[in-house]
Image: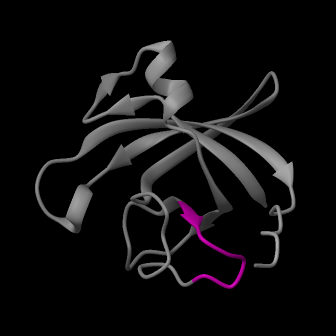
Amino acid sequence: MYCDVYLLRRQGVKLSKDDVSASKTNGWLYYATLGPLAPPDRHAFLLRDHSGRVGFDEVLPRLLNARLRAISGGILLQGSVQPGFTGPHFRQAWWVVPTGQAKEEPAP
């Protein structure tokens, strides 16, 4: 599903309302269970396009152990991120607003 995504935290710290507004990005949201070989098992990915490949075309670092909850006007995804796949995990939350389809870029 194509969405606008707002980051609610940076390195585990809650962002101000202005910083949340400035963090807006968009892409194709995937919420998947990757199975016992890739714990934690529920991941959320924001990819550049609908045929994007996990691990290569991610717009944001994947959200690990993602839990989702419907909220007014969108979806709240909470979990953790591990930037660069090494180092500490940080709490993260995304406010996701489904927009339907990607906006097409005008031809040059």
Task: Give the residue at the far right of this rendering.
Answer: 100
Image position of 60 (left or right of 105): left
Task: Give the residue at the far front of this rendering.
Answer: 108
Quadrant in which residue 27 is drawn:
bottom right
Image position of 96 (left or right of 63): right
x and y percent of residue 84 in the render? Answer: 22, 65
Magenta stretch, main secondary structure class: loop
Name the quadrant of the C terminus: bottom right
From the viewer's side, name the closer residue of 108 and 12.
Answer: 108
From the viewer's side, name the closer residue of 20 and 30.
Answer: 20
Image position of 64 (left or right of 68): left
- The residues colored magenta run 45-52
Magenta stretch containing residue 51, yes or no?
yes
Depicted 87 relative to depicted 21: above or below: below
> Which residue appears at 78% of the width and 69% of the height?
105
> Which residue appears at 39% of the width and 37% of the height?
92
Quadrant in which residue 82 is drawn:
bottom left
x and y percent of residue 25 in the render? Answer: 58, 48
Depicted 18 relative to depicted 35: above or below: above
From the viewer's side, name the closer residue of 60 and 105.
Answer: 105
